[in-house]
Image (spheres, rainbow, N blue to C red):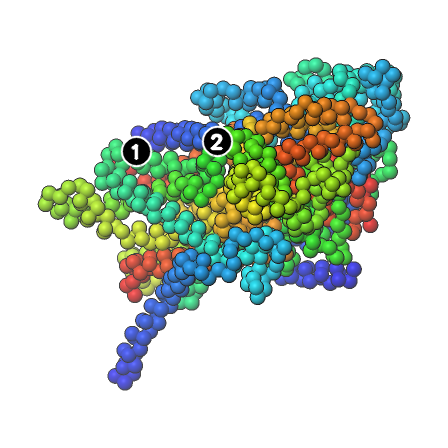
Amino acid sequence: MTTKYRQLNRRQFIQALSASALGVTGLAAFPGFAQAQGRKNALLIGLDIGDSITFDPARLAQYSSPMTVHNAYDTLVTMNPGDYINLKPNLATSWAYRPDGKAIRFTLLKGAKFASGNPVTAEDVKWSLERVINLKDQPAQYIAHVDKVEIVSPDTVDIVMKDPTQPLLTILAAPSFSIMDSKLLMAQGGTAALDAKEADKATTWLNGNSGGSAAWNFTAWERNQQIQLARNPNFRGEKPGFERIVIRHMSESAAQLLALKRGDIDIAFNLIPEQIATLKGDPQIDIIGTPSLDFIYMAVAANAEANPALAKKQNRHAIGCAIDYDGIINSLIGGSAVRPVSFLPVGVNGSTAELTKQIGFQQDLAKAKKLLAEAGNPDGFAFDLTYSNNAIAGVSYQNLAQKLQGDLARVGIKVNLNPIDQVNLRTLFTQGKLQAVLTFWNPPAVENQLWASATVNRVAKRVHWVPPEAMMKIVNDASAERDLAKAAVLWRKYQEGMVDAANLFVLIQPTYQIAVRKSVAGFKPTAAGWMAELGVTKPV
Amino acid sequence: MTAVALPQEVAAPASSRRRWLRRYALAVAGGVVILFWFAVALLAPVISPFNPEFVDIASRLQPPSYAHWLGTDALGRDVLSRVLYGSRISLIAGFSVVVISAVFGTVLGAIAAYARGRVEDLLMRLTDLVLCFPPIILAMAIAAALGIGTTNTIIAMLIVWWPKYARLARSLVLVQRSQEYVEAAHVLGFGHAHILFRHVVPNAIGPLIVMVTLDLGNAILVFAGLSFLGLGVVPPTPEWGAMVAEGRELVQQWWVATFPGIAILSVVMGFNFVGDGIRDWLDPHARRR
Amino acid sequence: MLRYLTNRVVTAFVMVLLATLVIFLIANTAPGDPALAQLGDLAASNPEYVKAFRAKWGLDLPLWERYWIFLKGVAHGDFGISIMSQRPVLDDIRDFAPATIELATIAFLLSILIGIPLGILAAVKRDSWIDHVARFVSLIGVSAPTFWLAFIMLAVFYGWLEIAPGPGRVDPIALLPPKVTGMLLIDCILAGDWETLRDAAAHLVLPATVLAAATLGLITRTTRASMLESLSQDYVRVARAKGLPEWRIVLGHALRNALIPVVTLGGLAYANLLTGAVMTETVFSWPGLGRYTFRSAVAVDFPAIMAITFIVAVVYIAINFLVDMSYAFLDPRAVKR
């Protein structure tokens, strides 16, 4: 405490000097009394929110907005941080497949209220989910197999499915499927009717307000500036320790670091590994790690027209054997990451870090050279690797691409780097026109089927892979299997198949490192794209 | 009285030399800096302690030390070697943009001024058109259409760069055109091209040289800026603007962004000092005293 | 005169048309498809969604028709809806422009308030130490890469010395005044919110200094050159001969004439500040137009790109026109051409 006191004095002293020296422009900020008071009651977060387009749960498709939505709305079921296999009750206290197997019946929590004071009813559940379906925006795709929502009693609903073998519960845990205050929303122009795509007018309102039942009430959004949340007075659980939350847009991690060190923000989300390393041992700051379900992967297309060498499976396996996986994780991201076997992140059913050691690719340069010789390319070959100028979890694609370039050069494979903008990259990749791509996958919901079906369907097309029938069957069977242990066995088979195909090389599944000032207690990050449980944070 | 006057007369050349030196000291210093960077660009392979593209992930982000005088970057590459090699791209980009657009712009501007009438109108409206593009959008649109790379970035810069030369050349030639010697040449029966390029242009070349020198620094600056925004070079080629971009998040590892920034500053300053000196030297008001 | 004016207006009109058309065509040659980029991964591989998206944004129409729709919209003062932010482009610009205007204006004021006196001093005391210092300072200002200077300033004054506030327009905790102009300094004064005003002013110091550096050099050099020019004119000699005090000669006679090129250059420099703040805005997390321009271009957000191109072209032509008019005013011969 003494050091802080002295520091403040020095700062004020210099501020006074500069204020008199610089005149008008040097009105350096003496934090005023009221401001200092406000600071104590508010939780200040630095986050890059440049990607936010909407906070309407039924339209969520971005990366940073789910945190706000998750803290303002409740879903029927949820997950505990760190456990992405077992579901936890939220607005639904219990659930079970209906005896006919066509629907899941949910029993709702009694006494839950929205921020407006309205009770949470079966009517709201039906309205919210049907609105998602009828708005026909991105989230509607994930519950396309839902037929309708039936109200059984004021606190019981059935979600009826067209195809009950398809998974639903894990998907409903995602923020897109939040239960909204239907009375309030209808007053704001919302509708869940069949013509909602055209008739619904509530999105504008939802971009600055919320109608949820969680600990926080979303109260303001200024594009590229800030998001504000206020305590929900009608929240059923424990009252949050802060009166409000301000999420400040800070696109540069260096700015977040400085602001955090100065105490201008309490939590910094987008620090890069090098910055985290310098914060370790700082008496004012805790580093909290959240294993994420996101990953960075390299997709390599087996398109003989674009690159005949890549069309040969041995050559792709040679790539898999030449990459310095441990070097990437230990240095580029400071060791705070894991690597899954393939397209199922570590932490979901059937995917563990140990399994990667058993059946995943390992660096083996001799084997890589042998594979190249078998493929008829003993001197290696060349291919283009495309990436955009972005960074994920502080790892820039540019650095990663250059690292891969260096690794593959050791077995004679020449990588030509091709940086392009994000729009071109997504367009060309979706059209299957790229030889190899470095990109990112983050899940809309924690459901194995969403990852697996992507790899055998749309992503397979992009990399010119025709999955064998057996592979399709494994994915279908594993998705339909309700016994977790049996499903895990099937998912292992799926991952073996993916390694054999050698089109997708998952390189980094980051553990997000969040820096929190010690003045904040109880910060609980969660993974799966919605990032943090802010209701339980408290000032110290 | 003579005894007093004498030392003054003797002192006059000395003080004027001092004044000359003081006035052109910056220009001389700038010239030295430019020569230094030219030598570096030529000798980069000889004087660089390391391969600038060699990735050594184990020794990444090391602070300046005896082995790595300016430290290492995020991929363990030697910052000093990359700064030294980076001079090549910057100088090449700066010179190609300025020289090509100066030649192209001057020819167009001279033709416009000489031809007058509809040709002049058309050419001048063309320069207006180019000047009213938002440069960032144009550069990014071109990068998106042609792809990112040194050549494409230079092309994008050329498109927006030449008009100012066209305008300058036009105004200079307009002044020269009305001079008597041009009319004399006409009377003597010389052709248009001959008069324009043998008489008019050489006489207008002074201000052009000043502009080119000052502009070299500017072009290097803009190229580095575009690289900083991710439009310049394809990695792993070392380039100063891109190096600053790589290091701008690394506040603790300040050496990654600081040194390439100093390199840009010094070379641009060199050109500006020299250009400023030449301007003074050519400027009759400045020379008179 | 009237003919001259009509001529100018018609030319300006054609120029804006051509500028937007060229940008439109170049942007369309890029392979990037906003539909595939903006839709989520799953939706992007569903042809039905892609088709609906294209229809919604008019991306499925032939090129000429899209350009025609743009023109028709502009005629009604409507630039369409941004693909990226999904709301009217004009709303976006209304949100982002004040931040940039505020920053650019402060930077501009800073550079003329320092640059002009410095330039005058340098001219009057030519070859003195002050002339050399002014020259050195202004040349460094012109030579420093903005993006690097911004990084260094932030690291030194905010991170290390802790005497300047950090990135952004205000402290994260500050309560913003009701939005009237969008320019915080003015809005705070209107609302009588002195605390936030001080905060916003303090946040302007670093980015405005960075942005002013280059302009300052330019203005100092130009002022000095044109002061030297006018100090050597006959009327100055006459004034000197009349025995007027030196300060009256400098400030009264010489300066008035010397300022004309400075004003011209200043106008263009201000326009450049408005459009050229991308890098400063990037490093200082400043939610301004430069950043918006960059993001729109990256996202191939056609309506936004077109609107910005249009506005920049109009601003440029307007400033050019004013400059020409001032020439015409000073030297009527220029009009006759």
B156 lies above or below C26: below
Residue farthest left in this picture: B188
A226 lies above or below A475: below
Residue farthest right in this picture: A110
A427 lies above or below B105: above
**Residue nearer the viewer, A270 or A237:** A270
> Is C34 placed left or right of B22 in the picture?
right
Mark 1 surroundings within 10 Å by alpha-carbon count, few (fewer than 14), some (14 through 19), many (20 or more): few
Q: Position of residue A378 (x, y in %)?
A: 53, 42
Camera sees residue A125? yes
Q: Chain of mark 2?
A: C
A40 lies above or below C312: below
Camera sees residue B247? no
Residue at horizontal 48 percent and vertical 24 percent from the top: C70
Mark nearest the camera among 1 and 2 is: 2
Q: Chain of mark 1?
A: B
Q: Which residue is mark 2?
A: C30
**Residue nearer the viewer, A91 or A147:** A147
Q: Which residue is mark 1?
A: B122
Q: Position of residue A334 (x, y in %)?
A: 68, 50
Q: Position of residue C231 (x, y in %)?
A: 33, 58
Residue at horizontal 66 percent and vertical 38 percent from the top: A506
